Image: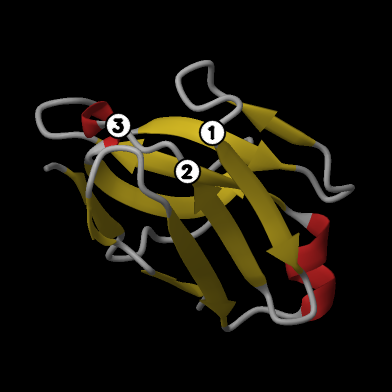
Amino acid sequence: QVQLVESGGGLVEPGGSLRLSCAASGTTFSTFSSNGMGWYRQAPGKQREAIATISRYKVTNYADSVKGRFTISRDDITRTVYLQMSSLKPEDTAVYYCNTIPSINYNWGQGAQVTVSS
């Protein structure tokens, strides 16, 4: 069974930066590298939304709310997906998750809490 573990969250001031990691275990290089992957976030009282995706060919797409500030990347050898976040805003406060795209193939991990506040 595939397990996703997100890390790197924390408290940061507006304008700051964080780098999130999502490590997948219980899957092979072949399977992982064939999947598109995405970062999702869920803010308090809101539905979970996809904010950044990366295809198996490393083509990336971003929600308008994070475009130009966030960068998604992947390392298939280590089965890890990253989200570099900069120019963070209070509205970026949420729990961040990773999973496959376009469909959700794995159980959700525990997520990484990101809080942007002064």
Which residue type does callout 1 highlight?
Answer: Arg
Q: Residues within 10 Å of mark 2 (few under 14, many from 20)?
A: some
Specify how the rendered protein is coloured: secondary structure
Task: Name the residue beneath numbered marker 3.
Answer: 89
The answer to which quarter of the image holds residue 32 is: bottom right
The amino acid at mark 3 is Lys
Say if 114 sits above or below 5 in the image: above
Nearer to me, 30 or 54:
54
Gap between marks 2 and 3 measured at Cα? 9 Å
Above or below, 13 relative to 24: above
Does dot 2 land on a helix, a strand or a loop?
loop
Q: Quadrant of residue 14?
A: top left
| Above or below for 59 versus 115 | above
Residue 25 x, y percent position in the rendering:
56, 82
Residue behind mark 1: 69
Crowdedness near tag 3: few (<14), some (14–19) or many (≥20) residues, C-alpha within 10 Å:
some
Q: Which residue is drawn at 22% across and 39% down?
A: 93
12 displayed left or right of 36? left
